[in-house]
Image (spheres, rainbow, N blue to C red):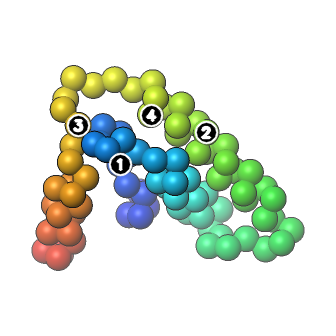
Amino acid sequence: MCRNIKTLFNFEPPVTDEEIRAASLQFVRKVSGFNKPSKVNEAAFLAAVDQIAAVSRTLLNSLETSAPPKNREEEAAKARARYSAQ
């Protein structure tokens, strides 16, 4: 799994479209092997990012949980602590 793709479900405040797009961009970069596609591949690359973002939004909107939402700042602090322990 790409370390730059973060969990987006069940957070307070809820995930934004920008966060979904950023995760989608990271996914397409990982799958394609391109950090920045060539001009000839740019349209296909950006279309894939848009499609992944749309599917991700649909998924996130349809998921249900009884767990309370996680606090973004607390989860970020935990991630920093895990990273610094490595």
Which sits earlier in the primary sequence, circle 2 or circle 3? 2
Which sits earlier in the primary sequence, circle 2 or circle 1? 1
Q: Residue furthest front?
A: 13
Q: Amino acid at mark 2?
A: Ala
| Mark 4 to mark 2 CA distance (whole Å) | 10 Å
| Residue at horizontal 34 percent and vertical 23 percent from the top | 64
Q: Looking at the figure, which quarter contains the N terminus?
A: bottom left
Residue 33 x %, y %: 62, 68
Q: Secondary structure at mark 4?
A: helix
Q: Nearer the viewer, mark 2 or mark 3?
A: 3
Q: Count neighbours of disc 1 (C-alpha within 10 A) and say few if under 14, some if 14 to 19, many if 20 or more.
A: few
| Residue at horizontal 58 percent and vertical 59 percent from the top | 25
Checking the image for residue 7, the label placed there is 1
Checking the image for residue 60, the label placed there is 4
Of residue 45 and residue 21, the one placed in the foreground of this image is: 21
Location of residue 43 (image quadrant)? bottom right
Which sits earlier in the primary sequence, circle 1 or circle 3? 1
Instruction: Report which residue position mark 2 lands on.
Output: 54
Q: Count neighbours of disc 2 (C-alpha within 10 A) and say few if under 14, some if 14 to 19, many if 20 or more.
A: some
Asked if disc 1 and disc 3 are in contact, CB closer than 8 Å, the reply is no
Q: Count neighbours of disc 4 (C-alpha within 10 A) and say few if under 14, some if 14 to 19, many if 20 or more.
A: some
| Residue at horizontal 86 percent and vertical 68 percent from the top | 40
Residue 81 x %, y %: 14, 69
Instruction: Report which residue position mark 3 lands on.
Output: 69
